[in-house]
Amino acid sequence: MYMLIIFLMALAWMNLSSKQTQTLHNERYVKTYEADVTLIKNEQVFYFDQKPSYLISSGTRISMNQLLAEQSVSTQGYASDKSAAINKAISHAGSSKKELDLSLIDSFDEDDKTKSQREIRIMLSALRYQSKSEEELKDILEKNSGASISSPTLKKIGSDYPGYVFFDDDGYEQVFTFSNMDMLSKEFLEEADEIADLNRGYGNNVLKVTDDDGVIIVAAVPKEVELQREALLQERKTGIYERLDEENLSSYIELLTERVDLLRGFPKVKFNMDDNEYAAYLIESIEEEEEKILVFMLKEMVQGEILSKRKGTADIYTYENQGYLVPSRSVFEKDGKSYVMVLSKGYLRRNVEVTVTLVDGSQVFLSRSENSNLSDGMQVLINP
């Protein structure tokens, strides 16, 4: 009898030693979706008749009164184009409909590129003024004039804001604007690519000023991609649209840019881009036939590196939590409940009830908030 007991104990020990175990560690668990993103910023593009010898470097943030160059700059060509754009906007004053004139793509003349680019630039610039009244536009037109500006600063050349300066353009600056956001669709994003390709490089001696108060990031994703807190979006945005004079995306974004207190009520979503982690607010989701366009507003870490980008690839966090990741075969069912088997003192077994938060392929995630009976250092049998 004594030998039988020893044999059974040895058999039990051999069975236990053949089992694999995993030590539980509370860790950050993240699921992501890789998406192509487009960055939309408040930007102004100035161009001068002569090239200044700048006292600043491209990609630098400067104030409104910081000296740009020691010599004077002339803005005759820039002012002439601005007047043409304002006059075009006056002819459409009161019209709520905005659309890109795609006929300018077909009529583009490579042999007279400057003329064709000017037509595109005026069309795009006019769209930015279209929301203003005829009286406001005439007032702007009256004040607009080309001049020789001594000791030029952002304030003197007519910039609306301080920010980061760059000495080139990519053609998107007049297409992707906060004021054009009510045109946002997958089709608009594709048309913008065509327009920007032709618009790029118009005007000599470019100075671009990019506002660092915030960046809009848009991503077209399949409808089935669901963000962790996306359900909160509808609740947050409904009341805000109702308070707008014009219930469109441009007015909505303008309000959220100014009212950070309202913005902070929206779900915050993290994403990785170029080895940097950012956190932006999800402010809109526009559904199309097979996709939806997610619209984010980034208000933190808005610096030269991200402001220099127009397009990129981002890993958008669809889920993030703290907890334990274990092989799915370590979880078993008993009487309609889920359990893991835990070892204590190296050999004693006990079943611990768990709540399965997510199934991720061959692994299971057990969030810490839903599984308070689990703790770091526990030994879980992988094949109980």
Image: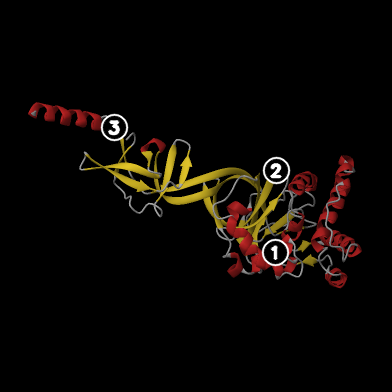
The first of marks 1 and 2 along the sequence is: 1
Q: In this view, does 62 lie to the left or right of 24?
A: right
Is residue 22 something one can see in this rendering?
Answer: yes
Given the image, on which type of amino acid does mark 2 rest? Answer: Glu
* SS for callout 3: loop
Q: Residue at the spot x=51%, y=49% of the render?
A: 319
Q: Residues within 10 Å of mark 3 (few under 14, many from 20)?
A: few
The residue carrying mark 1 is 252
Name above or below for residue 42 compared with residue 376. below
The answer to which of marks 1 and 3 sits earlier in the sequence is 3
Identified at 41% across, 47% down, the residue is 366
Residue linked to disc 3: 19
Which of the two discs, 3 and 2, labels the residue nearer the N terminus?
A: 3
- Looking at the picture, which amino acid does disc 3 mark? Lys
User: Which of 365/32 is in front?
Assistant: 365
x, y (%) of residue 153? 69, 66
**In the image as oriented, which residue stretches furthest toward the right?**
91
Q: In which quarter of the image is residue 229?
A: bottom right
Query: Mark 2 — residue?
Result: 290
Q: In this view, does 75 lie to the left or right of 365?
A: right
- Please state which amino acid type lies under the numbered disc 1: Tyr
Image quarter of the C terminus:
top left
Asked whether disc 3 touches disc 2, contact meaning CB atoms under 8 Å apart, the reply is no
Whether residues under marks 1 and 2 lie with C-beta atoms below 8 angstroms apart, the answer is: no
